[in-house]
Image: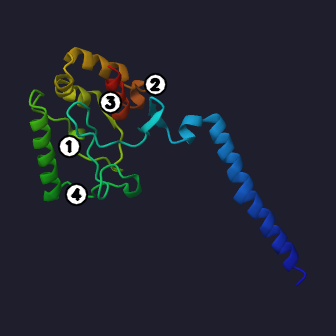
Amino acid sequence: MSQLRPAILLLLLLTLVTGVVYPLLTTGLAQWLFPSQSSGSLLEEDGVARGSALIGQNFTQPNYFWGRPSATGDKPYNPLASGGSNLAASNPALDKAVADRVAALRGANPQAPAAVPVELVTASASGLDPDISPQAALWQAPRVAASRKVPVAQVEALIEKMTHRPLMPFLGTPTINVLQLNMALNEL
């Protein structure tokens, strides 16, 4: 019985420190040091949150750029069902899915080159990838320009402007956040 009281006091103290003080401290520091990231990296347009810079969105209209396909459960880019298709390279279902996506992209982009960028027909491992390469964006530029009735050169200049380059070329590849690019298109 003499050891019960110190055990209970230690349990309450550790619960308070690790369950209340520490989470409040780390949350407060995160909000102070990294306000955008700790709030979900939300992208706003006219004061309204349009999405997160970290999670892709399912754009299907011809006047917007399209991201990578998503293999997340019942609806595309569902963060609660993050994951890939888990289809092996030898699986005929993967071949059919890629062939269907290539046919759909060629049908929607008849003026684009025949070679479809591989990232536009294959899902990422998480199924939530928000970025595409500049080459994938340039491949879609004629469709977007035609549907918005603007010169292709203007859309290509926007792609160049929105391209995120790594600090040093050997540290990564250039990417474009599809949501940010589409929001910039709306501003044209």
Residue at 28% x, 58% y is 86
Dot 2 or dot 1, earlier in sequence: 1
- Amino acid carrying label 1: it is Val
| Horizontal and vertical percent position of residue 6 | 87, 73
| Label 3 neighbour load within 10 Å: few <14, some 14-19, many 20+ | some
Instruction: Give the number of marks.
Output: 4
Task: Residue at the far right: name it.
Answer: 2
Dot 3 or dot 1, earlier in sequence: 1
Task: Give the SS element for disc 4.
Answer: loop
Front label number (3 vs 1):
3
Q: CA distance from mark 3 to mark 1?
A: 19 Å
118 left or right of 8 in image: left
Residue carrying label 4: 88
Dot 2 or dot 3, earlier in sequence: 2
178 left or right of 168 in image: left
Q: CA distance from mark 1 to mark 4?
A: 15 Å
Q: CA distance from mark 2 to mark 3?
A: 24 Å
Residue carrying label 3: 182
| Horizontal and vertical percent position of residue 28 | 68, 43
Dot 4 or dot 2, earlier in sequence: 4
Marks 1 and 4 close (CB-CB < 8 Å): no
Task: Give the SS element for disc 3.
Answer: helix
Front label number (2 vs 3):
3
Find residue 56 and name its label.
none
Dot 4 or dot 3, earlier in sequence: 4
Residue carrying label 1: 121
Front label number (4 vs 3):
3
Dot 1 or dot 4, earlier in sequence: 4
Residue carrying label 2: 167
Quadrant in the picture for the N terminus: bottom right
Task: Give the SS element for disc 2.
Answer: loop
